[in-house]
Amino acid sequence: MKKVKLLKLSLLIFAVFASSTFANGLSLNSIGTRALGMGGAFVGFANDGTALYWNPAGLAGQSSRIYVFMTDVIPSGYYKMDAAGIDANINSNHYISPNLIANYTKGKWAFALGVYVPAGLGAEYNGKDLKNLTAPFGPYEWMSKLAVINISPGVAYKVSDKFSIGLALNVYYGMFDLKRPNDTPMDTNGDGVPDVLPQYSENSSGVGYGFTLGLKYDINSKFSLGATFRSSTKVTMDGTAELTTVNMKDDFSRDVTWPMWIGGGIAFHPKTNMTITVDAQYSNWSALDKLTAKYDNWGNGEFVLNWEDAIQYRVGFEHAVSKAFVYRLGYYYDPAPAPDKTLNILFPSSTNNAFSAGFTYSFGKIQIDAAGEYLMGAERNVPAEPGYAMPGKHLLNVFSFSIGIGYKL
């Protein structure tokens, strides 16, 4: 019982900071400060504790270390529909996620435990800017927050001097908050004329399980290859929904699937102090076709997404100027998983070009990492035709930065 209470307390502490994590799709693009600085091209390199996420096989042979890092994600963008006189900006909030990973090496074996935020989605708008969407009713609160905390133990084994294998268990704790206008007006006077469009709000949480399998092969001193498979994870989330305007509540459940992910990468060392990395990373977004809420008394409600599978392409660069100072650069191309027909302002999705940079300064057993990333989204112009959920112009840009501190054991 004490262990269960401790687990719940740990989840609560991280939920306070991480429940608002923001990203394109359902995955943060770069877990870890070093990886962020290299554009997330880290599957074939995986040379710090975040290998637990990118490629668990990379844990084998590493120095034992405790690593703490924080990432702050700041979105900007807009939704415009000239025909309705709508010009709404996404609130540029700070979405902060704390992360902790510890890894320990003993001979050919390596072990790790991480508590980190691998996934999120969300947006928030000023309701007054969207009032014309619900006229003559409103304004309303428009907000979504979907996030995951992963408690991940991992193990790796160095089969030979060249080849390693690793496995991590993913225990996902998911959280989902939503505020928007109700789908249809209601008749509260009993005269057959709808007179109220209630404000809808909900919150839910749940747990799901999956795994990550990684392989790493060092061809020679200049080249290494990596491959990672992350299983899909279904989280059944239970919660309460409320129509606040008319004081109605109902309990519900919703299954949310974080998709299967496959990554492959190569790390090239043209010099002993220089590394170039190239990755291709595939996400099975088509598994996320609908988000269906099953209410106890209100029937079913759903968001139709029909997202499409996508491949991200990433490149990274690292140069050790000295034993104490290393700098990094990165770029990746991130195609939008959401088609125009289902694009929704509460579930933003854009095709992105992202640029990043970072550095590490080490002294004694301590390392300090810092990195920044700017994700430039392409504007999407959804036509005002039948079958399109939200016609108009959609734009999402994201600036994020990360700082980390590591201590060598």
Image (cartoon, grey):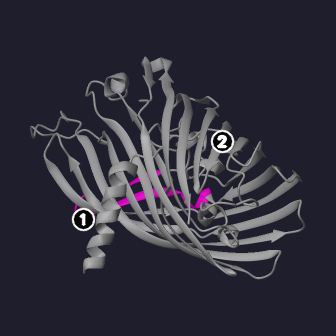
| Residue 324 to residue 400: above or below | below
- In this view, the residue in front, 55 or 119, is 55
Residue 73 is inside the magenta segment? no
Where does the image place residue 50, in percent across and percent down from the top left? 60, 60
Q: Quadrant of residue 264?
A: bottom right
Left or right of 181? Residue 115 is right
- In this view, the residue in front, 94 or 289, is 94
Secondary element under disc 1, as helix, strand or loop, is loop
Q: Amino acid at mark 1?
A: Asp
> Which residue is drawn at the image coordinates 25% and 81% (left, top)?
1
Secondary element under disc 2, as helix, strand or loop, is strand
| Residue 136 to residue 259: above or below | above
Left or right of 393? Residue 267 is right
> Which residue is drawn at the image coordinates 18% and 35% (left, top)?
193
Asked whether residue 253 appears in the rendered view, the answer is: no
Region in magenta: 285-304
Residue 294 is inside the magenta segment? yes
- In this view, the residue in front, 61 or 168, is 61
Where does the image place residue 153, in percent across and percent down from the top left? 51, 73
> Which residue is drawn at the image coordinates 40% and 51% (left, top)?
18
Left or right of 165? Residue 246 is left
On the image, numbered disc 2 is attached to which residue?
Answer: 359
> Which residue is drawn at the image coordinates 53% and 36% (left, top)?
386
The quarter of the image holding the C terminus is bottom right
Left or right of 298? Residue 188 is left
Where does the image place residue 400, in percent across and percent down from the top left? 54, 38
> Alpha-carbon distance for marks 1 and 2?
52 Å
On the image, numbered disc 1 is attached to which residue?
Answer: 296
Q: Residues within 10 Å of mark 1 (few under 14, many from 20)?
A: few
Q: Amino acid at mark 2?
A: Phe
